[in-house]
Amino acid sequence: MSHFRITGMNDYLSDVARGIVPNRKSVNKFGAAPSGIQTTYTDIWDRANATPTQQIWTAPTQARVHAIVSTSAEDAAGGTGAASVIVYGLTDWDTKEANETITLTGATPANTSNSYVIIHRMKCVGQASTTGAGVNIGVITATAATDNTVTASILAGNGQTEMAIYGVPSVQDALLYRWSVGIDKTSANAATCDFELRVNENPNVQLKGFLRKDDISVQSTGANVHERAFAVPPKYSGPCIIKTQGIASAADIDGHAEFDLVLVDK
């Protein structure tokens, strides 16, 4: 009997992913902090690196036009890098996810047509010519007007963002089916990392109140990857922002996290 229940759930989630279940949408969000989890709280996203450039991700204070720019002139139509970027996010906290394609102009910023309260994913589009690399040669960032906050970033060669952060509008609920975390094994000193799943339950009012919803701890010498699946998924009602954080026993720990959601229309 258990086998049939599991099979039925797998079929359901597969159908959601295929887009054939009404009023449902599957979301997989994954992020990495490249040698970037510190001994203080660090969000799992592209700019959390060993410097670190930016440990804590920040949303714009209101819907903002974002400037999309690369550090390489080759990330432009006709160049050898990415030709354009698809931007995914929320234009306000009461509307489902929107997306648009921005033609890159290298190191010269190109503005989004929409204003966004959150950009939670960007993906590169390759050149029309087969001679181009197809992915970005430089670092591509989305910077909010007025606030000057970097909402999303694609590291050189990645082709898309790696941010375990996602915004849910008020017209949807998010059901969390799974989340997983991990750190690299170490060849020298052992390290541990405590990961937290955090949710801001009213980002339309304030942007810093992330509540601690779940925890997973890992160590580099043994269980350095851990996954938690839910038989009964917790529900996070939009508007909300879901993200993962880590705090490590040593600086510059290479970590990653991801979570799987099903969005349900209210």
Image (spheres, rainbow, N blue to C red):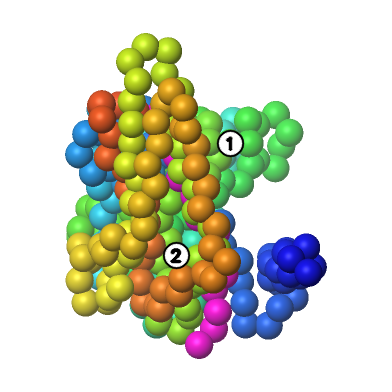
**Highlighted range, magenta:** 254-266
Q: Residue at x 52, y 47 (%)?
A: 227
The one nearer the camera, 258 or 169, is 258
State the residue position of label 2.
89
Quarter of the image where one finds residue 52: top left
Q: Residue at x 29, y 67 (%)?
A: 200
Q: Is residue 214 left or right of residue 100?
A: left
State whether residue 133 is above or below residue 226: above
Q: Earlier in the sequence, mark 2 or mark 1?
A: 2
Amino acid type at circle 2 is: Gly
The location of residue 140, given as percent across then percent down, is 42, 41
Q: Residue at x 41, y 73 (%)?
A: 236
- Please name which of the two marks, 2 or 1, marks the residue nearer to the observer: 2
Q: Is residue 58 left or right of residue 96?
A: left
Mark identifier at residue 135: 1
Asked whether residue 144 is in view, the answer is yes
The location of residue 38, given as percent across then percent down, is 25, 33
Amino acid type at circle 1 is: Val
